[in-house]
Image (tube, grey):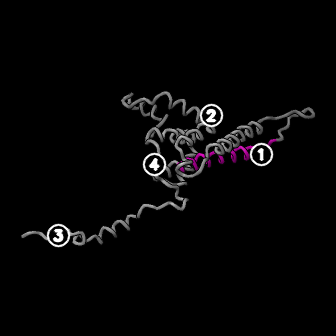
Amino acid sequence: FGGPLLIFESLCSAFNQEVPPSTEAIRFALSLFVPYYVLPVAFARINTEKVLGVGWAPPLFCWMAFWWWIWITMHIAELAPYRRGGKWNNPAEGWWAMAWTGYLLVVVAVAGCRYSTRSVYRIPGNVVHDFLVSLVAYPLVICQISAQEVIQGAPFDTQVSPLSPEYKPEPAAEEVQATTRSYDPASFGINTEVPS
């Protein structure tokens, strides 16, 4: 999935590659400026509540909106001086730390949604990768999550959360090989003799 970055691929290939639709640019802009709206909507569309047993969209919206605006307002507060007694003061020194804490908490929410989306669709990966990609390119991660259902279709209804008691993991490769080696065709009435 290239998402909005496909425009660069299209430009570099002299438009031999397909140009992404304008909806990708709109989705990217929304993901960049209002991720607290785009991500919960996409996450609810993937229907993680049915698959994972968790209804995360409303609390996710509140969490992300709060910390997103903390990130922005604390940076503004850091820069906003005031005048008292004839001289300019800046009482908000150090608020940048709270601002970046807010950003990191938004990134944690995005990484958690990416991890859950991968779990629902059984896409290989790990949490560290999810966090680092979300830290560096959160709008692209949100675009990827919101396009996942379009690309791969709705998730399987039969999937169960790995945290639920009904979860039955698929057998490991060693178990499959062990059962394959112990297969005896004669026990099923199959003649294995080669005619001479």
Which range is magenta?
92-116
Residue at 52 percent of width and 30 percent of height: 25
Per the image, label 4 sits on a secondary structure element best described as loop
Q: Which residue is mark 2?
A: 33
Q: Which residue is mark 3?
A: 192
**Looking at the figure, which quarter contains the N terminus?**
top left
Q: Which residue is mark 4?
A: 156
Would you say the residues marked 4 and 2 are in contact, meaning their CB atoms lie under 8 Å apart? no
Nearer the observer, 190 or 67: 190
Image depth: mark 2 or mark 3 in front = 3
Disc 1: CA contacts within 10 A as few (<14), some (14-19) or many (>=20): few
Image depth: mark 2 or mark 1 in front = 2
* Magenta span main SS: helix
Nearer the observer, 92 or 28: 28
Query: What is the spatial separation of the Cα atoms under label 2 and label 1, in whole angstroms?
Result: 24 Å
Query: What is the spatial separation of the Cα atoms under label 4 and label 1, in whole angstroms?
Result: 48 Å
Query: What is the spatial separation of the Cα atoms under label 2 and label 3, in whole angstroms?
Result: 68 Å
Residue at 57 percent of width and 46 percent of height: 134
Q: Position of residue 110 (x, y in %)?
A: 59, 45
Q: Upstream in the sequence, badge 2 or badge 1?
A: 2
In the displayed orientation, state which residue is furthest to the front: 189
Per the image, label 1 sits on a secondary structure element best described as loop
